[in-house]
Amino acid sequence: MTDTEAAAPYRRERARSAEDANELVGPPVLEQGFKVKALRDVRNDGTYPGRPVGDFLIREGDVGYVISIGTYLQMYYIYAVDFFEKQVVVGMRARELQVIDAHCNDPQ
């Protein structure tokens, strides 16, 4: 284990890799209002205010709603997901989320 891995063991992947395709050439996979489930744990990497670095923000299986869609590095869609039970909003990529209900906010 390197010193970097020992200092930040919760950070497993890089934000950008050479194999990643530019997601912005197509429409977003998810839409506002989609009910989603987290496919992995998310820890604070130091960018979430008011919480210690390394603290779990959400856990795999937590449920939330997509509240907005943004972009990152001019390559990726980032979905702001409100995990209301945890009282936290986290930016996630589509591959980190599973759609539970795409029609939960449709008029009845």
Image: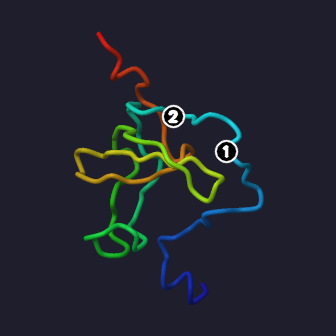
Disc with the residue nearer the chain's start (2 vs 1): 1
Location of residue 14 by image quarter:
bottom right
Find residue 24 and report its horizontal and vertical position in percent.
66, 44
Which residue: 32% across, 45% down?
82
Quadrant where the image shows the N terminus: bottom right
Find residue 107 and report its horizontal and vertical position in percent.
31, 13
Q: Which residue lies most toward the bottom here?
A: 3
Q: Amino acid at mark 1?
A: Glu
Q: Is residue 3 above or below residue 42?
A: below
| Residue designated by label 1 | 23
Quadrant where the image shows the C terminus: top left
| Residue designated by label 2 | 30
Disc 2 is placed on an element classified as loop
Number of marks in picture:
2
Which residue: 61% across, 50% down?
76
Find residue 44 and report its horizontal and vertical position in percent.
38, 68
Q: Is residue 86 left or right of residue 70?
A: left
Q: CA distance from mark 2 to mark 1?
A: 12 Å
Label 2 environment density (alpha carbons within 10 Å; few <14, some 14–19, many ≥20): many
Find residue 73 and report its horizontal and vertical position in percent.
62, 59
Label 1 environment density (alpha carbons within 10 Å; few <14, some 14–19, many ≥20): some
Q: How is the image coloured?
A: rainbow
Q: Is residue 99 left or right of residue 56?
A: right
Q: Which residue lies most toward the top here?
A: 108
Of residues 29 and 3, the one drawn nearer to the viewer in this rendering: 29
